[in-house]
Amino acid sequence: MRDPIVAIATPYGESAVGMIRLSGKGVHEIVKKLFKTKAKFEERKALYGTLTDLEGKPVDEGIAIFYKAPKSYTGEDMVEITLHGNPVILEKALKIFIDAGCRLAEPGEFTKRAFLNQKLDLTQAEAVADLISAKTDLAREVALRQLRGELSKIIKPLREKLLELHAYLEADIEFSEEDIPTITKDQVLEVIDEVIAKVKELLKTSTAGRVIREGLKLAIVGKPNVGKSSLFNALLGQERAIVTDIAGTTRDFIEETLNLKGVPVRIVDTAGIRKTDDPVEKIGVQRSKEKIQSADVILFVVDGSGEFTEEDEEVFREVKDKNPLVVINKVDLGVKIPLEIFEGLSIIKVSARTGYGLKALEEEILKRVGFVSQEGLKIYVSVRHEKLLKEALEVLERFRERYSVEDISPEIAMLDVREASDLLGEIIGEVTTEEVLGNIFSRFCIGK
Ligand SMILES: Nc1nc2c(ncn2[C@@H]2O[C@H](COP(=O)(O)OP(=O)(O)OP(=O)(O)O)[C@@H](O)[C@H]2O)c(=O)[nH]1
Ligand SMILES: [Mg+2]
């Protein structure tokens, strides 16, 4: 068991209850000395009692639960003490346990220990952080599936297939003189193809995976007065931005979060882009251009009932190669604008005033991130998984290409197979380094 650690596991602030969590060598003894209870001691049972300081002075009353290794979250001896939710109390308790010999836990250290003690694999440990930061119900569901091992269930067998192949190739070297049946070239290719297909399938979920976890950045841009703020309000379902018929109404960008079928969307209304001498508007226009750069999806709004003007043209030039969705607004007034200009781009006709076309626009936004509907929802890989899957795919495809035309020695073949299986192993944490773990767990909050 590792050294004893302690942390406050609940957010800072006043609340009904707050929790202190301890894990590691000797924490049961430490808590037993400081938490006085009349209840008969039993593990995994709520014990009502009083927490005291090192001099025996009472600090607060609460409930302690003792967990004995390995049946705990971290796989070590643990105690969770629930006190009244007040930072004064919790910080005092924290200090007492530190004075009693515990160390303040690092971010994610409890979960890291759970991983090191094989209570969770790496994708499951990551899912704990995803679950805590899930912004929508869908994000929660996706995180929970991963926590329950659904991604591992796909990755693990793929890695095992490669390891098995590796073993066959190895046998090929050692027993080549003897009469032992080894693997044929076709069989090798069959396994490789099977793994490649699955990896590709997983990679298809990566854009949606990132968006579900981190949210989608959507920027509404266009020249002044085309109805950007009206569209922003219509999508949000509330009169958040000021709308007037005066060009240049929106001076600074406004951001809100929208839940689009479970995808958290960070939606930005920007100032209309045009040449101006007004110093305030100038800054607003500059900021709109910055928002174009950082957006995942751009809604390029034009007034469909008007002409396509020089000002429209100027904004269009800024967004053209970002594959924007072209939103033809004000269709309740008729469509006059020539649509050929937008050839090759997705065009959606809407009326922010009547609500016409908004559903289609939402669908189009979701389609853009590879998220069509909730049916068939299974697993969505994260940015880290995506990177490793892509590397594995590259190795496998390169290998496949060479192996199918050349006579590669089993020794050489083994190297590629090994590399690919290691990359998959890194996803679930069967192959890992201290640096990789450090990166993952430092994103956690303290106490988790
Ligand atoms: N008929 C009609 N009018 C609309 C529609 N959408 C917006 N408008 C009107 O167009 C005018 C400009 O709307 P805004 O939403 O303020 O336009 P904007 O693009 O945000 O303008 P700036 O902030 O100045 O860049 C207002 O008078 C709106 O009522 C629509 O779908 N149909
Ligand atoms: Mg506006």
Image (cartoon, rainbow, N blue to C red):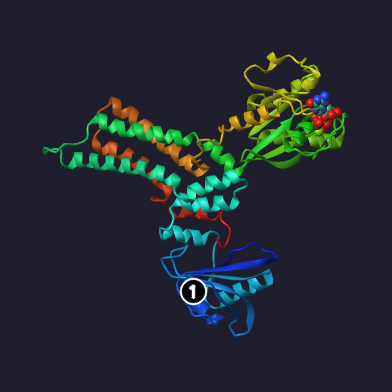
Q: Which residue is mark 1?
A: 27
**Above or below, 132 relative to 139:** below
Query: Looking at the picture, how far across and down is residue 24, in whole percent?
Result: 46, 69
Q: Quadrant of ligand 2?
A: top right
Q: Which image quadrant: the C terminus?
A: bottom right
What element does badge 1 sit on? helix
Which quarter of the figure has residue 258? top right
Q: Is 106 placed above or below 337 here? A: below
The image shows residue 435 at horizontal and vertical percentages of 47, 53
Q: Going by the image, does 34 lie left or right of 174?
A: right
Whether residue 439 is visible: no
Quarter of the figure that contains the N terminus:
bottom left
Residue sitting at x 76%, y 31%: 231
**Outermost residue toward the left?**
178
Task: Let me know if residue 86 appears in the view.
Answer: yes
Q: Residue at x 45, y 72 (%)?
A: 25
Question: Residue 136's quadrant in the figure?
Answer: top right
Residue 331 spot, x, y in % from top left: 77, 21
Q: Residue at point 72% right, 32% down? A: 220
Front residue of 268/423: it is: 268
The amino acid type of the residue labelled 1 equals Val
Q: How many marks?
A: 1
- Tell me what residue is drawn at x 39 percent, y 50 percent: 431
Q: Where residue 94 sits in the image (x, y, percent)?
A: 60, 72
